[in-house]
Amino acid sequence: MTWLTEFPQIDNGMLRDLKRAIDDGFRNFSRSYGDAIEAVFDPLRHFLSWSENLLTDTPWPIVLLVVGLLAWGASRSFRIVFACVGTLCLIGAFGMWEDTMKTISMILTSTLMAIALGIPIGVLMSRSDRVQSFVSPILDVMQTMPPFVYLIPVVMLLGIGKVPGLIAVVIYALPPMIRLTNLGIRQVDGEVLEAADAFGSSRWQRLVKAELPLAMPTIMAGINQTIMMALAMVVIASMIGVEGLGLPVLRAISNQYFTLGLFNGLAIVGIAILFDRVSQAFGHRLQKHRGGHNV
């Protein structure tokens, strides 16, 4: 009766040979094409280094002024402006300013990449149910796959550094951007689209002047979720060389430094709340504008 208690398994030798063949194939691929793939991402590396240097080298009063102006432009709320500026001042007072700027640089770069990739894919999904049925399972895998698994092929191809960490962050944070872009465009009122067609709009004009503007509140929700998921990857990305607030947290875990991990963890939470409140406020303003109310 052992066949009822022990599930039948593939022959160990066959399974071992299959795993070895896959590992050897990917290893040979990375050795043959790793340099070429790394060269493709050189512009991304330069942009990330430039943005990081820009934030770390800019005097802190200017950074606070820019953050305050951006928060005001997005929310029109003094409460949110004071909260953003106060959070950054508190982070700087505890000696975490430079790491925070590096983390913000990584988050902004990964969010821009997710927007650049996610909106076109979301638009394609909204245009075709077949594309949606093909892409949706891929997004499910991207969202449910343990983040550590992303690091294995990325590190094998690109080694240790900022760019591999950035790619892992984008893979993890991209699905909400795609899904909510698709959802926002599909929810656009059909009468609006009929009116656009009646005025002789092309497909491109209808997309740019009608669908995307009306779907913008939902797209902003996707941007908000993308930022939150990118911040959730900060500590994991630090394992492969990404500098910022995640690196001290990783060091605290390794050496059991409770206060170091706690302070840097709270700084990450502070940045998350900052981005969340500003993006949500901007999304609410867009929603009111969509409803025809004065802002």
Image (cartoon, rainbow, N blue to C red):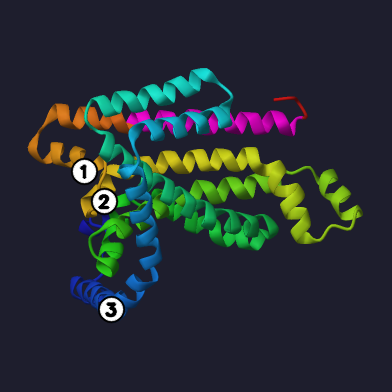
The amino acid type, in three-letter code, at marker 1 is Leu
Q: Please state, as top left, top right, bottom left or bottom right, where the N terminus lies in the image.
A: bottom left
* Marks 2/1: CA–CA distance: 7 Å
Is 252 located above or below residue 197 in the figure?
above
- Dot 1: within a 10 Å radius of its alpha carbon, few (fewer than 14), some, or many (20 or more) residues? many
Picture residue at 33% right of the left edge, 55% below the top = 49
Q: Position of residue 247 (x, y in %)?
A: 21, 43
Question: What stretch of residues is rendered in magenta?
Answer: 269-291
Q: Nearer the viewer, residue 247 or 153?
A: 247
Crowd band around label 3 with a 10 angstrom C-alpha radius: few (<14), some (14–19), many (20+): few
Residue 108: say if magenta.
no
**Where is mark 2, residue-wise?**
242
Q: Which residue is mark 1?
A: 247
Q: Residue at position x 40%, y 50% from top?
A: 172
Image x and y of residue 76, in percent: 59, 24
Residue 25: give its label: 3
Quarter holding the C terminus?
Answer: top right
Q: Helix, strand, or loop for circle 2?
A: loop
Residue 267 location, quadrant: top left
